[in-house]
Amino acid sequence: MDIIIPAAFFIASAAFAALGTGILVRFLPVMDVPNERSSHQTPTLRGGGLAVVPVILLAWLAAAGWAEAPFNQTVLWPVAGAAVLAVLSW
């Protein structure tokens, strides 16, 4: 029984991230054209993280709420740091 809730969060997060990425790629087709420093040989879509990162951040907050962890600095600082890193990375 202890594994059901974390597994549900994982499955729901993966499903929403996949769905969001599929939708986002249709509306934001940004192609990364390879050059001599690239690790890939064919053009590759970029920008899928725009759907994944918000889902993961919301899953962290939801998991903390489900576990009845206090919404204090223990939860909010890592989420805020990840959000700032995501914005800077974009």
Image (tube, grey):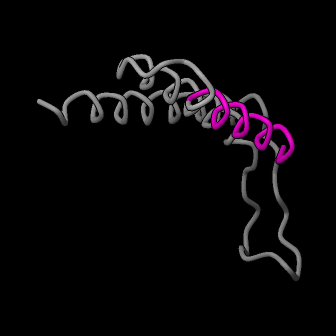
Residue 85: horizontal and vertical position, in percent? 78, 44
Residue 23: horizontal and vertical position, in percent? 62, 27
Q: Residue at x 55, y 34 (%)?
A: 56
Q: State the residue lying farthest toward the bottom.
A: 36
Which sits in the foreground, 15 or 36?
A: 15
Q: Residue at x 43, y 22 (%)?
A: 69
Q: Is residue 64 left or right of residue 39?
A: left
Q: Is residue 27 left or right of residue 77?
A: right
Q: Residue at x 38, y 17 (%)?
A: 68
User: So how many labels did they put on this image?
Assistant: 0
Figure quadrant of the N terminus: top left
Residue 14: horizontal and vertical position, in percent? 43, 36
Q: Quadrant of residue 42?
A: bottom right
Which sits in the foreground, 49 or 82?
A: 82
Q: Main secondary structure of the magenta part?
A: helix
Q: Quadrant of residue 88?
A: top right
Which stretch is magenta?
Answer: 75-90
Figure quadrant of the C terminus: top right
Whether residue 18 appears in magenta in the rendering, the answer is no
Q: Residue at x 56, y 29 (%)?
A: 75
Q: State the residue lying farthest toward the left.
A: 1
Whether residue 82 appears in magenta in the rendering, the answer is yes
Residue 46: horizontal and vertical position, in percent? 75, 49
Which sits in the foreground, 30 or 75?
A: 75
Which sits in the foreground, 40 or 14?
A: 14
